Amino acid sequence: MNWEQVEGKWDQMKGSVQTQWGKLTDDDLAMARGSRDHFVGRVKERYGVAKEEAERQVDEFMEAQT
């Protein structure tokens, strides 16, 4: 699944995202609104990881969704 598909299905994917990253709030997900950069930023902030690590986690999650 590529990120354009995620943007189109963001509302349906929120449950899976919150299962993976339980520290993310509904407000975090609403602010991200399917934007990869915003989403990576939220993961980075909530989990205290480097941007590269947040990107790796998001990419792995996306690969698992296909």
Image (cartoon, rainbow, N blue to C red):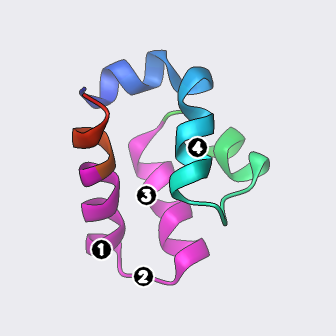
Cα–Cα gap, marks 4 and 2: 17 Å
Whether residue 33 can be seen here? no
Cα–Cα gap, marks 2 and 3: 10 Å
Q: Amino acid at mark 4?
A: Ala
Tell me if label 1 and label 4 are in contact, CB under 8 Å: no
Name which of mark 1 and mark 4 comes first in the sequence: 4
Total numbered labels = 4
Cα–Cα gap, marks 3 and 4: 9 Å
The numbered dot on residue 40 is 3
Q: Residue at x 53, y 30 (%)?
A: 13
Q: Which residue is mark 4?
A: 32
Q: Which residue is mark 1?
A: 53
Query: Magenta stretch: residue 52 in it?
Result: yes
Dominant secondary structure (helix, strand or loop) of the stretch shown in magenta: helix
Mark 4 is surrounded, within 10 Å at the Cα level, by few (under 14), some (14 to 19) or many (20 or more) other residues, namely some
The numbered dot on residue 49 is 2
The numbered dot on residue 41 is none
Name which of mark 4 and mark 2 comes first in the sequence: 4
Name which of mark 3 and mark 4 comes first in the sequence: 4
Tell me if label 3 and label 4 are in contact, CB under 8 Å: no
Q: Secondary structure at mark 2?
A: loop
Q: Amino acid at mark 3?
A: Val
Q: Where does the magenta region start and end?
A: 35-60
Cα–Cα gap, marks 1 and 3: 9 Å
Q: Amino acid at mark 2?
A: Val
- Residue 30 lies, in percent from the top left, at 70, 39
